[in-house]
Amino acid sequence: MGVPLFIGDEVSATGYRLAGMDVRVPAAEETRSLLHWGLANAPLILLTAEYAARIPAPELTRALISIRPPVLIVPDADGRVAVPDYGLRLKQALGVLE
């Protein structure tokens, strides 16, 4: 497989590019197809919360629970969209909230 893929805003992409990742800043209508391309070709996908919001929930859930490649939602440089609190969601699902 190739190098890890970052999908997100230009400012965040700059840092990930310096780290050696393949970075993409797609238009809104291209985000889904780019994610599907990454699922087939990249060993790891990092997706900012803003760009993750462009993916329909069922598709995003399938991508997040897939084992290969791992897909992670990361914050963007501006923090415009909050990263989901998966720890809280897991506790809610298990019924173990404090």
Image: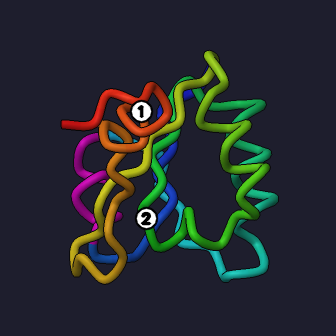
- Mark 1 touches mark 2? (CB < 8 Å): no
Q: Residue at x 35, y 33 (%)?
A: 91
Whether residue 39 appears in magenta in the rendering, the answer is no
Quadrant of residue 54 within the rendered picture: bottom right
Q: Dividing the picture into quarters, in which one does residue 42 lie?
A: top right
The boundaries of the magenta stretch are: 12-19
Marks counted in the figure total: 2
Instruction: Name the residue at 24% across, 42% down.
Output: 19
Q: CA distance from mark 1 to mark 2?
A: 18 Å
| Residue in the image at 35% along x and 64% along y | 13
Q: Is residue 78 left or right of residue 81?
A: left
**Nearest the eye: 34 or 73:** 73
Sequence order check, earlier mark of 1 and 2: 2
Q: Give the left or right position of residue 18, taking residue 42 as reference.
A: left
Mark 2 crowdedness (10 Å alpha carbons): few <14, some 14-19, many ≥20 = many
- Judge left or right: residue 87 versus residue 90: left
Classify residue 17 as left or right of residue 6.
Answer: left
